[in-house]
Amino acid sequence: MNALVRPQRGRLIAGVCAAVAARFGWNVTLVRILTVIAVVVFGLSLWAYILLWIVVPSER
């Protein structure tokens, strides 16, 4: 498994979904769709996304 880092390439907003997808070997589109659904349905996950944006280091 890869480390959890936000990639320089493949970002749409902050690269959080791309980092999670790369870390667990998932499809980035699936992670993005699940994130949007979670934000719309639950709302609280938006705060988790912002927190991960701050906490997860960016790739150099």
Image (tube, grey):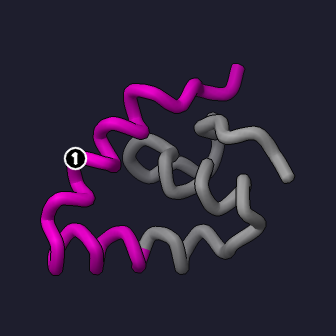
Rendering quarter of residue 34: bottom left
Instruction: Tell me the residue at 65%/36% (across/down).
Output: 5
Q: Is residue 49 left or right of residue 1?
A: left
What quarter of the picture does the C terminus occupy? top right
Question: In terms of secondary structure, where does tag 1 sit?
Answer: helix
Read off the residue under disc 1: 47
The three-letter code of the residue at mark 1 reads: Trp
Q: Main secondary structure of the magenta part?
A: helix
User: For the view shown, which residue lies furthest in the top direction?
Assistant: 60
**Could you tell me residue 9's position as x and y percent?**
64, 43
> 15 above or below 51?
below
Rendering quarter of residue 57: top right
Please tell me which residue lies in front, 59 or 50. Answer: 50
Q: Is residue 8 left or right of residue 51?
A: right
**Could you tell me residue 36's position as x and y percent?**
30, 72
Q: What number of labels is visible?
A: 1
Instruction: Tell me the residue at 22%/54% (across/down).
Output: 46
Q: Which residues are magenta?
A: 33-60
Please tell me which residue lies in front, 27 or 10. Answer: 27
